[in-house]
């Protein structure tokens, strides 16, 4: 059962078998640190989101509404084209992989 776990979790399970109380305390400590890091990450995300909003509003005042709207539309168009390109590459790679698996199954069934 433990052979399917990642090595770090296998070590933790082995440590839990030898010292359950310390293992639980270690697990609680890891959870507390993870929550603290998530809080910091959320604060940074909100800060950068507010910074982006301020930059957008400042752009309307400094360069004008039409220039800002055009820049946003161009950026959105470029981003959507890039996403479509990456999705096509992923789709092609997945189709190739599925086709190879299908061929292997066909070869195995013929034998």
Image: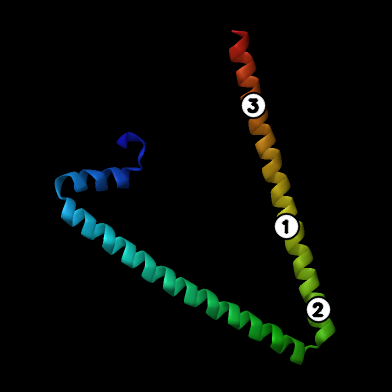
Q: Pointer 2: residues within 10 angstroms few (<14), some, or many (20+)? A: some
Displayed quadrant of residue 58: bottom right
Report how far apart the C-alphas of labels 2 and 3 lie in the structure.
46 Å
Q: Is residue 104 above or below residue 17?
A: above
Residue occupying the far left of the picture = 18
User: Could you give the CA–CA distance between mark 3 and mark 1, rounded to whole angstroms?
Assistant: 27 Å
> For the point 80% across and 71% down, which residue is it?
73
Say which residue label 1 marks: 82
**Pointer 3 residue:** 100
Q: Are marks 3 and 1 in contact (CB under 8 Å)?
A: no
Q: Element under label 2? A: helix
User: As rendered, which of 15 and 73 lies closer to the eye?
Assistant: 15
Q: In the picture shown, does residue 48 fall above or below 58?
A: above
Q: Residue at x 70, y 45 (%)?
A: 89
Q: Are marks 2 and 1 in contact (CB under 8 Å)?
A: no
Report the Cα–Cα distance between label 2 and label 1: 20 Å
Q: Mark 3 vs mark 1: which is more N-terminal?
A: 1
Where does label 2 land, which residue?
A: 69
Residue 23 lies, in percent from the top left, at: 21, 54
What label does residue 7 carry, if any? Answer: none
Quarter placement of the C terminus: top right
């Amino acid at each position: 059962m433990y052979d399917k776990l990642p090595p770090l979790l296998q070590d933790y399970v082995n440590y839990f078998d030898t010292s359950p109380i310390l293992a639980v305390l270690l697990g609680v400590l890891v959870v507390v640190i993870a929550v603290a890091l998530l809080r910091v990450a959320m604060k940074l995300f909100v800060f950068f989101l507010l910074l982006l909003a301020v930059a957008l509003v400042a752009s309307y005042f400094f360069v004008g509404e039409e220039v800002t709207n055009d820049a946003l539309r161009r950026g959105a168009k470029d981003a959507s084209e890039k996403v479509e390109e990456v999705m096509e590459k992923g789709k092609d790679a997945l189709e190739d992989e599925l086709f190879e698996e299908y061929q292997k199954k066909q070869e195995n069934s013929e034998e």
